[in-house]
Amino acid sequence: MLHSWPAIVADNKAILFTAVTTGATTGTHIDAYVRATRERRTVIDAGSVPLYLSGHLLFFRDNSLIAAPFDVNSLATSGPPTTVLEGMALDQLGAPMVAISSTGSLAYIPGSATRRLVWVSRQGVEEPISDTPRAYQNPRLSPDGHRIIVEVAGGDLWVQDVERPTFSKLTSGDTVGNTFAVWTPDSQRAVFRTVTGMWVIDVDARHSQMIPGTRVSDIPTSITPDGHTLAFVRQTAESGVADIYTMSLDGDLAPHVAVKTPGYDGGAQFSPDGRWMAYVSNESGQFEVYVQPYPGPDREHPVSTNGGTHPKWNRNGRELFYRNGNSMMVADVSMRDGEINLSIPHVLFDQRYVFGSAQTVANFDVSPDGQRFVMVKDDSGSGRLNIVLNWFEELKARVPSR
């Protein structure tokens, strides 16, 4: 069971919070905890991220902000819920990117339904993959190059066929907050993140199961070429920052630390031969891309020279791509006497594409031949922050408190 997003109400006498009991859509609800009596009760059967303001309980459901009149004495709603804001962007944990001040100002980032998946050549030439605009994020091209798993706003994963204009839902109501998919090398299964931990799904059969011992903070990033080992990002309360872990997918499920620095570490990518790991760390004061031997020894080789994140290997193992701002960078990779040699990176193209919600996890992928990239293009120029002043007046008019 997961407890998250607490909100203090009733002069610090009670706490509202999100409770995830089963990991399914029906298993996410809002509970209240009374501190004096230690009583716990369910306030909202389906919802998350509670917030009490101006006589109202605000919460999140189906990618929308909902409001209901709320009595802090009885800790119960006193009227029907009403949708007050739709189409917000989500962060990497599936929470809405919205903030409300005590004075009544509302700030939010809108979810963009005008994004498209596009191919981009090494020279920056675009070609549409699908003409249908959706709130795409984190596309992952299958190793055989035939399908793309991609997130769409609302916490579900979908499969886009590359050769035919078909778009089908992959995840079901069995899991919530489905993000950050990673294909297995045989293009048959994928590991993905949910609000209860990481799951693995058979892409054709649509059968999924949870990976025991994983957490909501775990973000899968790469699987070794033999399909046996998963790399993922995990943030712990002890370190306060993210580190890179690995775990077996078919044996001992105990996680092992692969990269741990005083900074934020993530975005791990196994090389095509499985002997190297590219990753991102800001231990130097800014995000840079590094490579180190896998599974060891722990010796890092800098790749980027002036900032970089979101590494991806060319599947021939001879190039390493990453992003620096809007620039797609590439460094040549060669081996000599068991040592890795990296060229000075250079720019392939410099064009604006969506970065996604994670600091280190790539919001793009590379074709099997390394000649083009799956990118997310936003035709609306989103990323804007919407601010509504005196929003409490609108809230009170639409949802009268009692």
Image: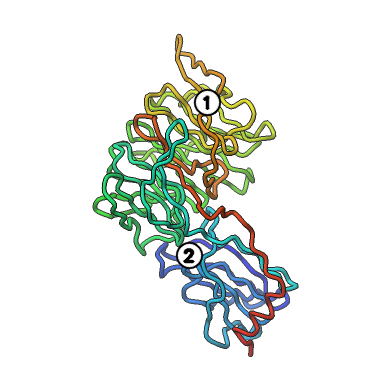
**Extreme-left residue of the structure:** 205
Residue 250 seen in the figure: no
Q: Position of residue 293 (x, y in %)?
A: 48, 23
Instruction: Estimate the spatial distance between the alpha carbons at disc 2 and disc 1, rounded to whole Å.
Output: 37 Å
Q: Position of residue 220 (x, y in %)?
A: 45, 44
Secondary structure under the numbered disc 2 in the rendered image: strand
Residue 291 is labelled as: 1
Vertically, is 339 above or below 349? above
**Extreme-bottom residue of the structure:** 402
Q: Which of marks 2 and 1 is in front?
A: 1
* Between 325 and 151, the one nearer to me in the picture: 325
Vertically, is 21 above or below 259? below
Counting residues from the start of the chain, the first of labels 2 and 1 encountered is 2
Q: Which residue is drawn at 37% across and 24% down?
A: 316
Q: Tell me the kind of residue under disc 2.
A: Val
* Between 42 and 326, the one nearer to me in the picture: 326
Tell me, yes or no, whether the two marked residues, 2 and 1, touch with CB atoms within 8 Å: no
Q: Which residue is denoted by mark 2 in the rendering?
A: 20
Secondary structure under the numbered disc 1 in the rendered image: strand
Instruction: Please state if 252 lies on the left or on the right of 62 as rendered.
Output: left
Residue 354 seen in the figure: yes
Q: Tell me the kind of residue under disc 1.
A: Val
Q: Residue at x 39, y 60 (%)?
A: 175
Q: Are there few (<14), some (14-19), or many (20+) residues within 10 Å of tag 1?
A: many
Q: Residue at x 73, y 71 (%)?
A: 102
Q: Where is residue 252 in the image (x, y as percent from the top left)?
A: 38, 39
**Extreme-top residue of the structure:** 337
Q: Are there few (<14), some (14-19), or many (20+) residues within 10 Å of tag 2?
A: many
